[in-house]
Amino acid sequence: MPALDPRLPLAQDLELNGKVVLVRVDHNVVEKGVIKDAFRIDSTYGLIHYIATKGGFPILMTHVGRTRDSKTGHIKTGTGTAVDSIVDYLNRKLSAGFVVPNFPIHPDFGVERLDPKVVEPYLARLKKREIGGVYLPNTRWFAGEESKDEKTKQLAEDLGQLADYYINDAFGSWQPHASTYDVAKTLPSAAGFLLQKELSHLDLVLSPERPFVAVVAGSKYDTKIGPLNKIYEKVDHLILGGVIYNAYLAAKYGIKVAGVDDADVELAKGLVEKDKTLGKIIEPEFVVESEILDKYDPAKVKTINIADFRPGQNYHYFLDIGPDSFNRPKILEILHGAKTIFVNAVLGLTPHFAAGSARIYKEIGANKNGRKLFGGGDTLTELKNLAPGVYLDALDDPSYYFFTGGGAVLTAIESGAYGLKPVAALLKA
């Protein structure tokens, strides 16, 4: 595995005995108060166990969901974005004894101040070993976490007063918020074990063994344009899915597809022009068209061959790649012969349109000689659901690696691994 940047401070180099350790994790796995996939939680067990065995006192924190209204600035709290289910899970799995402090909550502005005095009684119990750890409420409940103003500075300073060290083990939380970025300026800081492992594996994507194939999808073209252009430069072959593929098809063939913004089509034209020369994009030849989004109605669904596209034609929603696209010898040769495959994609709108994803996961599993690197979030969840055999094989196969944050990987492709701002903050620290 490639070596880490020697400037990166590491958790294992800290003297933790008797020290309070503030740890930013990415346990953003809760939907409507229920854990949807515990992979990200499980991936942080190593650091939690290490802190305890070295005599440290852990304080954990994560964000959960989206809580801030971008127009009003109001912060919505409640059980749907609470950390309670995460804490219950940790305490069941590890007998960890984590406790969540009770902060006063404003109906519009969440927790207006992380007052260290609220946490002090819990720290006193922690240092007496009466509890196993403190787990702060959802960081996005706190004023200043996302706002980039004086409240952000205040929140970072308040967090800094809680501990002796700060450890970032939240690879998937790549945005520079108070709890991932600013707090590193207030405490001696280091990278956790998971973050170290993710950074090491990133090099397999940034400097891949070739042939290198990427499978990328998304619901909005404009949010992926930067990373998509960068990954296009790196790959030998690129397979697109989701709205990204729909926008590309609309731009290339002059068709209209429901659910695809004109602005996305204009952006996709640049990729179309580039590919006329380089020819890296492999186009799955069948798309699944549906008149409706919210369910699969056979009477309203049909499979279309892209060879039948004509300029000016209008189509309903393209909600999946037709699985027969992967019967073509050329695409199978590319997938089976790749030395590196990076997958950051659910090709269809699951759960009703999943056949395309299931088929490509199966064909990737048939590649026995290459590295298979999967982005986190929905990609990993759907791999488990749609290709459980491939997933179970992968657990014991070192040629596979599952990142805990697909968005973080795409951002790193654009900026470099150490260009991720929370990681850069650790280098400065």
Image (spheres, rainbow, N blue to C red):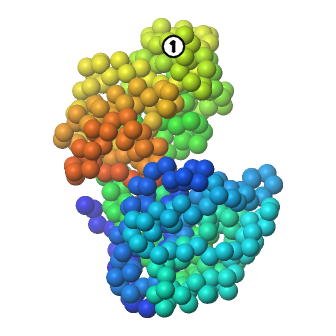
- Residue 397 placement (x, y as % from top left): 21, 49
The residue that appears at 42% across and 20% down in the rendered structure is 322
Q: Front-most of 420 and 358?
A: 358
Residue under label 1: 298
Q: Residue at x 34, y 82 (%)?
A: 53
Residue 394 position, x and y percent, is 26, 46
- In the image, 63 versus 419, the foreground residue is 63
SS state under label 1: helix
Direction from residue 418 to residue 32 in the image, left or right: right
Question: Which amino acid type is shown beneath numbered disc 1?
Answer: Pro
Residue 403, placed above or below residue 115:
above
Q: Is residue 275 visible?
A: no
Q: Quadrant of the N terminus?
A: bottom left
Q: Position of residue 226 (x, y in %)?
A: 53, 44
Residue 109 x, y percent position in the rendering: 78, 64
Examine the image and state in which quarter residue 67 appears: bottom right
Q: How many marks?
A: 1
Which of the 4 image quarters holds residue 84?
bottom right
* Left or right: 401 as drawn, with respect to 216: left
Judged left or right of residue 26, residue 393 is: left
